[in-house]
Image: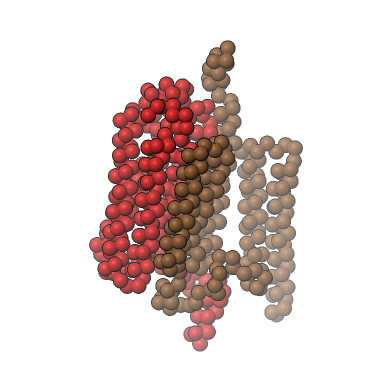
Chain colours: A brown, B red
């Protein structure tokens, strides 16, 4: 009985893995294909494929985690124990650790302001600023908001949802570039300037 | 027997059992609110970026000194308020209610400082003639054909953020006043406060640091 259940689970995991790889493959194929223009529809298709890949990969990863093939990357200590309220309240960052995080956050902010001072090209600047802001957001969420010390199930409920939804917002951007390139009024004005 | 059961709950991190998230209902509710609120801010910031990317010209009106230094000071104030909030939460957890209240009040004061600084900046810009759908004449001359949406994105995003800070100060005030009853709410209020800080970590670079007036066009 136990054996057949195990086999069933393994077969399901195999199917999930195959579907995840397939979704990733479709996304990669779409990016590689000649018709890819990074337009809204292309990005949407890629994002949906990646989302499907993630969905199919989650059970596989959870299974691997349960069987000790993966260790929880969010917890650097064995999972905090159990049931008692007092126990629950003691774990988490110390004041010293939080002060260090605060100093790191200030340092990153100072770095951002320095970039604004030395005049970096705006596209590069945008990328670096967003990278630094995402690191800062992650530090705040993990340590100040204590998410690092919560249950994995809570982390998995909150973080992937937000990441996927914010990525879905981002598929609008090709449209804004298109709008920029197709404005008739401004281009007439520019021609007049040049003429 | 009970111990064995508790242990199996702890070992299986996905199964959940009776405590799927192992957090109280208030904390879970606050997390859900934060998720929806971050989508609100995400939508606004994406709308701003969209408007900016689709405009042929966008004003970049903030000179490094004083505007950027001023807004960096605001960032410093808000980040420091997060640190005092952390201290308030850890004091409340250690049942040191008096010191928790003091840290909460410090956080509120820093929040109020942020609001006052922000108001000063707003009144400066409004004084120059910036309105939701209208650029000051000086800016129009400096960036001919620039999108008038600058004002609406600026006031919309920073205004909603300031409103969040204001709400947070009121919230912290209630928690600080009734800290004996609401000891566990200190942590939940802390989640909200850190979230407001987190949003500013995106507003500050996107609105201010990407709009630096390098060539001193406005000549201030």
Image coords of residue A72 (percent x, y): 59, 68
* Residue found 46% across the figure and 54% down from its top: A105
Query: In the image as oriented, which residue stretches furthest toward the bottom?
Result: B1
Query: In the image as oriented, which residue stretches furthest toward the front?
Result: A118
Compared with A108, A60 (above or below) is: below
Q: Is residue B60 visible?
A: no
Compared with A134, A175 (above or below) is: above
Query: In the image as oriented, which residue stretches furthest toward the left?
Result: B177
Q: Please name whichever residue, B87 or A39, is drawn nearer the observer in this view of the structure.
A: B87
Q: Please name whichever residue, B32 or A1, is drawn nearer the observer in this view of the structure.
A: B32
Q: Please name whichever residue, A186 or B17, is drawn nearer the observer in this view of the structure.
A: A186
Q: Is residue A6 visible?
A: yes
Image coords of residue A52 (percent x, y): 64, 54
* Residue found 34% across the figure and 64% down from its top: B88
Which image quarter is the C terminus of chain B in? top left
Image coords of residue B178 (percent x, y): 25, 64
Give the quarter of the image for residue B67. top left
Compared with A110, A178 (above or below) is: above
Image coords of residue B208 (percent x, y): 44, 39
* Residue found 63% across the figure and 47% down from its top: A47
* Residue found 40% across the figure and 53% down from its top: B79
Q: Is residue B198 left or right of residue A58?
A: left
Q: Is residue B39 left or right of residue B76?
A: right
């Amino acid at each position: 009985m136990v054996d057949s259940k195990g086999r069933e689970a393994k077969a399901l995991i195999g199917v999930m893995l195959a579907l995840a790889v397939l979704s990733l493959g479709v996304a990669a194929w779409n990016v590689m294909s000649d018709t890819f223009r990074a337009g809204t529809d292309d990005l949407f298709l890629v994002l949906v494929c990646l989302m499907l890949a993630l969905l199919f990969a989650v059970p596989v990863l959870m299974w691997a985690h349960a069987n000790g093939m993966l260790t929880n990357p969010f917890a650097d200590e064995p999972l905090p124990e159990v049931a008692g309220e007092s126990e629950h309240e003691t774990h988490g960052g110390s004041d010293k650790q939080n002060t260090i995080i605060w100093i790191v956050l200030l340092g990153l902010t100072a770095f951002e302001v320095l970039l604004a001072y030395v005049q970096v090209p705006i596209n590069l600047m945008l990328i670096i600023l967003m990278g630094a802001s995402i690191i800062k957001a992650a530090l705040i969420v993990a340590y100040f908001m204590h998410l690092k010390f919560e249950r994995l199930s809570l982390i998995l409920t909150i973080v992937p949802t937000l990441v996927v939804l914010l990525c879905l917002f981002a598929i609008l951007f090709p449209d804004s570039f298109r709008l920029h390139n197709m404005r008739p009024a401004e281009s007439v004005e520019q021609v007049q300037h040049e003429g | 027997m009970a111990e064995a059961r508790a242990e199996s709950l702890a070992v299986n991190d996905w199964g959940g059992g009776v405590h799927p998230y192992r957090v109280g209902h208030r904390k879970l509710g606050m997390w859900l609110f934060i998720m929806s609120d971050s989508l609100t801010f995400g939508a606004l910031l994406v709308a701003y970026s969209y408007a900016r990317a689709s405009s042929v010209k966008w004003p970049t009106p903030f000179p490094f000194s004083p505007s950027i230094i001023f807004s960096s000071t605001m960032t410093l104030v808000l980040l420091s308020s997060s640190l005092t909030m952390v201290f308030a939460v850890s004091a409340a957890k250690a049942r040191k209610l008096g010191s928790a209240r003091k840290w909460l009040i410090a956080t509120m004061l820093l929040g109020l400082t942020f609001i006052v600084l922000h108001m000063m900046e707003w009144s400066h810009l409004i004084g120059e003639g910036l309105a939701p759908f209208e650029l000051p004449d000086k800016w129009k001359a400096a960036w001919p054909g620039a999108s008038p949406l600058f004002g609406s994105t600026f006031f919309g995003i920073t205004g909603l953020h300031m409103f969040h800070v204001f709400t947070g100060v009121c919230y912290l005030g209630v928690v600080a006043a009734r800290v004996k009853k609401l000891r566990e709410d200190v942590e939940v209020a802390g989640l909200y406060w850190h979230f407001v800080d987190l949003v500013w970590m995106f507003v500050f670079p996107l609105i201010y640091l990407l709009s630096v007036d390098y060539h001193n066009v406005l000549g201030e």
